[in-house]
Image: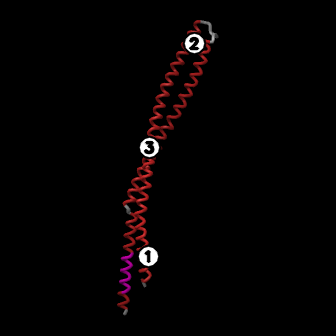
Amino acid sequence: MSDDHSREDLETLLELQDADQVVKRVKHKLDNLEEQQRLDEAQAKVDEVERQHADIRVELDLVQPKVKKLEDEISLLEQRKADEAQKLYGGEITNPRELQGMRAELESTERRIGDHEDALLEVMEEAEGIQSRLDELAQRSADLQREVADREAERDAAAKDLLAELAEAEVARDAVRARVP
């Protein structure tokens, strides 16, 4: 009788070992889902695009103060030009030499305004190019975010079946474990 009892115990232990293997196998499948790998790859792409976006945003943040500075300088030069023109054509100056000097100063101010406007156009074009790249990356990020959501849904669907299988395997294992002496 003790042989039968030992044999029965041994069979129960072997049955428990098999049940444990089934649980481990299902957990391994869960841990190594192909859908999870695809999700991880999609998320890595999102992370890279967002890193690029942040880097380019820094570039734009460096250019914008240049635009403001040039606009402010042009505004000051325009005011100076208006003041000089008022003096030149207002009749305040009658000395021909002073008039000639004032004309030269007015022409110099006009050239400086032109130079600043040219520089402003270049900086604004640079800012526009950077903004265009930011917009493209934002669109790419949105597309990739949708891909991540799709990959999450695929992973969740695949995991759902495995989780159900795992729950069944654990219930079966627990039933066998309850019979172990």
Q: Quick one: label 2, few (<14), some, or many (20+) residues within 10 Å?
A: some
Dot 2 falls on a residue whose secondary structure is helix
Report, in whole angstroms, how far the alpha carbon at label 2 lies from the one at label 3: 52 Å
Image coords of residue 20 (percent x, y): 39, 75
Report the residue at 54% width, 30% height from top. Answer: 69
Dot 3 falls on a residue whose secondary structure is helix
Of the two numbered discs 2 and 1 in the rendering, the one whose residue sits closer to the viewer: 1
Name the quadrant of the C terminus.
bottom left
Residue carrying label 3: 137
Residue carrying label 1: 171
Decide whether residue 10 is among the magenta residues: yes
Residue 102: numbered disc: 2
Of the two numbered discs 2 and 3 in the rendering, the one whose residue sits closer to the viewer: 3
Image coords of residue 154 (percent x, y): 41, 59
Residue type beneath disc 3 = Leu
Query: Which of the 4 image quadrants contains residue 86?
Result: top right
- Reply above or below: 3 against 126: below
Image coords of residue 39 (percent x, y): 41, 56
Image coords of residue 177 (percent x, y): 43, 80
Dot 1 falls on a residue whose secondary structure is helix
Q: Quick one: label 1, few (<14), some, or many (20+) residues within 10 Å?
A: some
Residue range (magenta): 8-19
User: Going from the N terminus, do you reach mark 2 or mark 1 first?
Assistant: 2
Residue type beneath disc 2 = Met
- Reply above or below: 103 against 68: above
User: Going from the N terminus, do you reach mark 3 or mark 1 first?
Assistant: 3
Residue type beneath disc 1 = Val
